[in-house]
Amino acid sequence: MDNKHVLTLHTITNGEDWFSRSGGYGKKEIEAIEDPEGGNTKEPPTSIPSPFARFDLVRTAFARLAQFETLTGKDTHNDERLVSECFDVGELFFNFDKLKDNLDIISWNKTDNLNTLRESSAVGHQRLGAALNLFLEQDGGQARQDGGYNFARMDSLFILRYTDDRDSGIVGGTSPSTLFFSAPHSLKFVNVQFGNQKLFGDGFTPLHLRDADYQKFWHGLSTRPGFGDCFPEVLAYLQKSLNLLKQQNNKLWQQIGNGAEKLRGDAFETLFDNLTSANGDLVEILDYRMKKVRVDATQFSRSGFVLNSEKYARLFPDKLSPMLLQENYQGRLIYTKDYWNKAQAVPPVVAEDWRENKRKLPGQADFYPWLTISDFLDPYIIRLVYPINADKFYDGGLTGNSLLQSYLLPLTKTFFDFFDADDLIAGKKVKLLLENRAGNSVKATLTIPLLPGEPPIVFDRIYYANDISEAPRPANETRNEGAVTEYQFGVNLMPFVRFANGPSPIYRVQVVDQDLDHYTYGNDYKLQFLTRDNKPLPVAEPKERSRKKQNVPDSVTTKYYAVGQNFDYIAVEAGGRRGLILPRFDQALREPGAVDFTFAIDFGTTNTHIEYTTNADPNPKAFTMGVADDENMVGKSATNPADSAIATLHHPDPTRRQYMNAVKATDIADVVPVELHPDRIGPHERASFPTRTALLENTPRWAETLAGFMDFNPALLYEKQNLMGYTVETNLKWANYRQDDREEKRVEAYIQSLLLLVRNKVLLNNGNLAATKLVWFYPLSMLETRRNYFEEVWNRQFAAIISTKTFPQRIPESTAPYYWYEGGSGEHAIQAESYPAVCVDIGGGTSDVVVFQRGKPTLITSFRFAANAIFGDAFATEGAALRNGFVRKYETKITALLNDNGFGELVKAYEKIKGRQRSEDIVAFFFSLKDNRDLQGKVSIDFNEMLGKDESLKIVFLVFYTALVYHIAQMMKARQMAMPRYIAFSGNGSKVLRVLSTKPAVLSQLARLIYQSVYEADYHTDGLEVIVEQKAPKEATCKGGLKHSTTLRFDRADDGRNDELIEATKRVLLGTTDQRFAGRKDTYETIGNDPAVLTDVVGEVRAFLTVLFSVNETMPFKDKFGVRAGDLDEYRKILEKDLADNVQVGFKRKRNDSDQKDPVEETLFFYPLVKGLNALAAHAANQ
Amino acid sequence: MAHKLFIFAIGGTGSRVVKALTMLLASGVTLGDTSVVVPIIVDPHKANDDLKRTEDLLKTYQRIRNDLTQKPGPGAFFGQDIRTLKNIINNSDKLADTYTFELKGVGNETFGQYIDYAQLDPANKALTELLFSERNLNTEMNVGFVGNPNIGSVVLNQFKDSDEFRQFAANFAANDRVFIISSIFGGTGAAGFPIILKNIRGATAGDLDNPEYLRNARIGALTALPYFGVEPNTERRIDKATFYSKAKAALHYYGRGVNDRLNRLYYIGDQLTQNYAYDPGEGGQRNDAHVVELAGALAIADFANLADADLDTENGKPVGPVFSEFGIRKNVETLTMADLGEETRQTLARPLTKMALLNAYITHQMRESSGSMAWTKEAPAIDSSFLGGSFYKTYLGDFSRAFTVWLGEMSRNKRGFAPFALEGNTKANENPALQNVAVGRDLAHLLVGYAPKGGLFAGKTDFNALENLLNKTTLRKTYPTPADKLMQAFGSGSDAFLGEKFPDLFKNA
């Protein structure tokens, strides 16, 4: 300590006393001041005696850092912060356009705002103004020359205010010394981030590590004239910064050039636009214009988070592909320009519209479309009360303990802008996982790989169940808490078939809503069908059929959508919740098939039947669905899922419905077979063909266009189960559609339904829909106008549902069975070579008679004397069943049998049928019990057999049969035909013959006697065989039709030639004693005006009765048929009673349905007999 | 050409440098052609002890000088005229007769209230928020600017509109000089300095009289860098850790906005420091005197002694500003006369030792000698009535006590200055050589590091020897008053005494 020492803080100088030094303290001396505290003050020094201290502070910081090649050095902590904040403020200005929502630029004009202060009446303001003015003037010199702050050249300062929903404050401003500077308080509230660089954060970012454009701005600006004179410290820094850039980011350095040479002049001006504040002021620093970055969202298109979806690019070719951002993402992907910051928060829901690019990237100032959890996952998940039918609907990969419930997919429609349904099922591009968790909650996890080798983006959300109160739990998307909503409903799709390239689909989609709960009763299910391109299909409003009632536990609401185009998924919305259904169309995919189907549809009065052949198998088969063909006819059928048309959302296995049972929602499943059709249709199933001709309806809106499997459906379970709440219409074929267009709509819906079944059958079985052929049948007794109406319906519906390449062909239903029997396809072979062969088709309403000679029909007639003549109510309309003999006699017995065996439900079904007081329907029910699958093995009720043993009613069948034969014989005789070799009976009504006798020989003998009486001659030696199709009398029509179809042409519409042929052979024997055929002049009008004709019919009937009772003498009714002989006289009296009146009534009734100018189309012979049979039955029932 | 010297002493350091200067001037240090020194203390800390002590001292100085019939000239005790601003002007009704400029509007008010921040228009509000931190705005100004000179620069600017500053301007003559004292690391001083400087250099007609003189004034300044610290203290607003960074930041600013406006700038500071108890000002800041302040006072003397030609200013810009630093010969923790530079010792040693002698004499000998020793007995007699009078008892006594305290503080401080073995000069007295010495009375040991002249003929170095010389110097001399006699006699007598006894140090001038 023995040397000279200067009392100061550095050790540069040496001297004694007060001595002069060269110049004032400059950088060298100041830097040489050793700070024992190391400069580690938290607060920046505030000792600059100027209100503009912060200008100076930042300026000094630049100067100090610029001393270091690395722009950092010992004790430069505060300087680095000040400079970093200066760049932060500049970057805010530079990106002002992006940050407009959060930033305001306040301009402070040196002249105006200073005057405001100085002229203010407030002393404080004057003081402030005076101080500011003093320094602006005194320190205003140019920086390099005078060491000043360039105030003289400064007109305005621009000040940034930042505001967001949490905070607001001044952030910084422009500076005439360093271009920008930050405000002196903590700026942590500024929530802006560029890349991983959080502005005003704990870390400092030197310029060369900042955004490329921003660096270009600074370096470009530094080439402007005079920059170095005004900002010498900044320029020094920039030069060092550029050196660092050259070493660390040579690519960018090359764009800037040595000494920023590439940004000189226009190059700089064209790179950026001038920044203006909100009120249009140009932002200037001195006279340098502030620039702003060009907002170019495409710059992020190469981010590793961009979801490169071909689908999105195809659907929205002009849009930016959005990023997928996940909080806590652990992978290493480039985000905007840096790698993803694992600490970056990402909100699970964002209100702003990403499609309009209104979303700011999390932690960033930039707008770019991005997606978060709520963009793909809904806030609510809808729980179903049954396991989903995962073979046919995608179950979302559901796993977990209790699998008695399932869920609709909680995916948004947005999701399908990027992914196809197939992608979900394949699970590669995207994978969905639903996991049942404790407390009835469920977790949905959506996993989307972005780049190979990097972890995928995982969006997940837990949906929480209701609390104990069962009140609906609201979701909280902000906290990423979803909520479970349980709905009791089903959705069913028919058919479960999909063609990539093939016929346009015809889907029926059924919604079954059994929400009866307080919270869900008001649910109104709305379905949207979305295409592969994620566009909703234009679909008509659904048809509502059933309507639930709040206090009726079993009641449901059903709705039906008709969808005519392919779709990929269904969006369900109800009660403010939504969810998606994804049919497994991958499992339903079919190629247009090679199999040609031919169908024959016999739409009968009582029963309807469908048979088909294929080019592979010409043997006609009854129509089935869902059952294996090969076991079609024997034993119990095996299920054939490939033939199953309906895909129910619920699992088809009834044993998996415990939960559904528990919440009493079973009607969700039970209503499907009722309102659509049973999953399995076949001989050993509850539903089979032939089936009762019956249409199920539930107060359709008649004013609307109505459709099959929407407003109506074939009641395949009619007579099989209680159809409470529905109306079943059975009289479809002969209903008076002229007076009531409801009938027309029913008929059309019924035919449409049958064709939809046919269509689905073809589609499911590799069939060629376009080549599908159809034969349909009509009764000869049908008026031409009515027949034309049917033809039009068949043609129209066939073209719409099946094909426009082929045309349906019609065959008189009476001729068809012949072709079946001819050549021995049936049980019996017949031929019509030497003698005529007679085919009689007895239906419910009509009997058709065709006489074949040498293989061709030569005489055809038809009349309404068939099964209903026996079982029906004659000409009565209302309440007649009360008097019906069959009903009265057997009703009690049969219902007792059912009740005793536990089939109360079936009794209810009966009561419902009975309610309409149509005896033929009641009797049809009695008959149906024999084939009712539910009764099999439990109770045998064979109505046919009961009647066969009933002696008192036998006479009815005897009269029916003999009258029929008598009339045919009279007609053949009138046509001078030989007595027939065969009489073949077909049709469901022919079953009544078996009541008369189960032995065909007895029937043959009786017929022969009638013929002999009529012909008044002995029978030829070859004799007569009466053939009654035993097993399937109804099917003979269809089978014959199919046999005959090979001779028909389906490639053109029916040209009427067959009709002409048939017309030529069609005869109507008036039924008079003169055995006269009706001519053209015998119209309903003329005959109605000629009482002699009707009187003569009475005579002919009396003649018949004489013949009938004379037969008893050679062939005792008692012995042969078990008819009580002692009653014969009584029977005869009943039959002869009111004969004339009955002819009149029968004729008038027919006349009212017919065109007055038309020739009579059926014999008048049977009119009094219809009434007579009814009376006979009633009489018998009393015995 | 004679000129006035206006000294703007800002803040605590300003007060203490003025105190040191007052001591020097009382001791006889000369200021060249300076006709009158006008100290103006600028400090918002009304309660500041340093300020009070300095102002009291100045008043004492002025009273002593006022009581002397023959005004002492350069080199004599109290030889320099010091006056308040009010003293030097004629029509001075508005001014208080004080050395202290009183700030207005700083009582119980925050800075934000001072500038009426709440009522500012949006743009000015935004600017204010940008320039001043919330803490700045909430700073209570009655406790000073506590290390925020940017606030000070606004608040102290009211000085320019004050009557004091107007009167200063009105009385400023072409050759008058200005010296500004401030510390660079504190609040008040750092802020006030540029304000005063800029207002002088920026004087415009209409606002002030003599704007031309002001703009071209000869201005010197002392800027004190850190030379002391504060005790660690939680809740502190003054932070020693920031002293250095503050100083550095301010030096940068000076380099740009201050230095070239000055004719002379004197830098001083010291790395060897002692922490003072933390006191931002409101508790009555009272820092021990420090040798750096003494050196600062010497800077004023240096400035005052410069020739006019060395301080030319043209168009408001000084021609060739000069910057000075202060060096010592030995870098030791406690300085003695021997450790100072030669020129400093030349300026300082004789006057200070003379004053120390006077002090010792007053303390230990006067009462004994008055009325008995020849030089006291002759008329005007220095008798007991004189000793009981206000001049001696009050003014000179006060001054003597202040001087003793001042020396004592300097000796105890770090870095210390302990040239004399006096009561209270602990540092000096720790010297083992002084163990058996009656400190303060033993003139042979008065000057630390210097032994009296030895040899056969050398008599004792004691009060006797001194009194002999006093007797000799008063012989055949007439004095108007005892006070004049005391001051003049002791001035010459002590001069002779030191030249005789300590010839090495005091080569007779």
Image: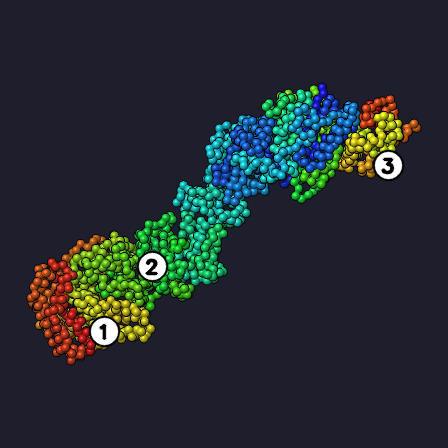
- Element assignment for label 2: strand
Point out the residue furthest to the bottom here. A1126
Q: Residues within 10 Å of mark 2 (few under 14, many from 20)?
A: many
Task: Say whether residue A1114 is left or right of residue A717.
Answer: left
Q: Which residue is mark 2?
A: A558
Q: Is the residue at mark 2 from the same chain as the one at mark 3?
A: no
Q: Nearer the viewer, mark 3 or mark 1?
A: 3
Task: Say whether residue A869 is left or right of residue A531.
Answer: left
Q: Quadrant of residue A1114?
A: bottom left
Residue A962 can be seen, yes or no? yes
Residue at image coords 24%, 66% = A916
- Element assignment for label 3: loop
Between A274 and A1009, the residue placed more toward the observer is A274
Point out the residue furthest to the right here. B456
Give residue A68's mark: none
Q: Nearer the viewer, mark 2 or mark 3?
A: 3
Q: Which residue is mark 1?
A: A888
Q: In which chain is the residue bearing label 3?
A: B
